[in-house]
Image (cartoon, rainbow, N blue to C red):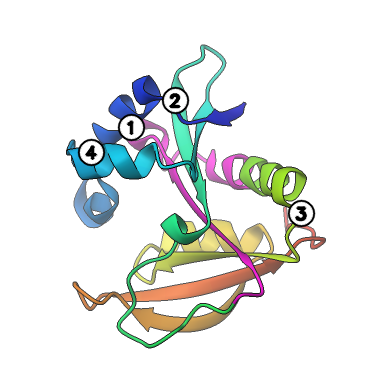
Amino acid sequence: MIVPMTAAYARQIAGWTYTNEYAVYSFSQTDETMNELLGGEYYAYLDAHGAPAGFFCFGQSARIPAAEKDPYGSNALDMGLGLRPDLCGQGKGHTFVMDGLHFAQREFAPEAIRLTVAAGNLRAVRTYTNAGFHYEASVNHSRTRKLFYILVRPSGERSAQ
């Protein structure tokens, strides 16, 4: 189930720590993080017990600060997402992504959905490609200079799985 973010869910999510090459996705437990999570663009993805198993965000919060000028057009809804660290690598990604896509289509009715993923996150790139996303552009993060891919999926497209 996907529900609006609450302070209790945000506190839990802000404490998630990813390891190794995925550490870039860890939040920090700061006022700035809490303000972002509670700013209206974030939603909690709950497991069967009502605990946060992931999150989605839609809109500006889903974009990275890119070194390139205006890499994001206005033709798509930006979607960001994160699965709880202990659930990563267990084959749950496709269902998670599809649940987020269905939610976005139902709530926002966009023409297309766009996401930005670290180029080195091959596991996520594969999941997104299998969910029907296609490469649109490469961008560099303005602070870290790491390479990211912008991927787009037309709303009506079916996934490969």
Q: Nearer the viewer, mark 2 or mark 4?
A: 2
Q: Are marks 2 and 4 in contact (CB under 8 Å)?
A: no
Which of the two labelled residues, at mark 4 and mark 3, occupies the earlier sequence position?
A: 4
Q: Is residue 38 visible?
A: yes
Q: Are marks 1 and 4 in contact (CB under 8 Å)?
A: no
- Left/right placement of residue 75 relative to residue 6 reads right
* Residue 29 position (above or below residue 123): above
Task: Give me the residue at 25% from left, 77% from top.
Answer: 142
- Left/right placement of residue 132 relative to residue 7 reads right
91 in the magenta segment: yes
Badge 2 amino acid? Pro
* Residue 151 position (above or below residue 42): below
* Residue 112 position (above or below residue 71): above
Disc marking residue 17 = 4
Q: Is residue 27 visible?
A: no
Task: Give me the residue at 53% from left, 62% from top.
Answer: 126
Classed neighbour count for the residue bearing mark 2: other residues with Cα under 10 Å, few (<14), some (14–19), many (≥20): many
- Which contiguous range is marked in magenta? 74-97
The residue that mark 2 highlights is: 52
Q: Secondary structure at mark 1?
A: helix
Using the numbered discs, state the Cα–Cα distance from disc 3 to disc 2 in whole angstroms.
25 Å
Task: Give me the residue at 64% from left, 68% from top.
Answer: 76
Using the numbered discs, state the Cα–Cα distance from disc 3 to disc 1 in whole angstroms.
27 Å
Disc marking residue 109 = 3
Which of the two labelled residues, at mark 3 and mark 2, occupies the earlier sequence position?
A: 2
Q: Are marks 1 and 2 in contact (CB under 8 Å)?
A: yes
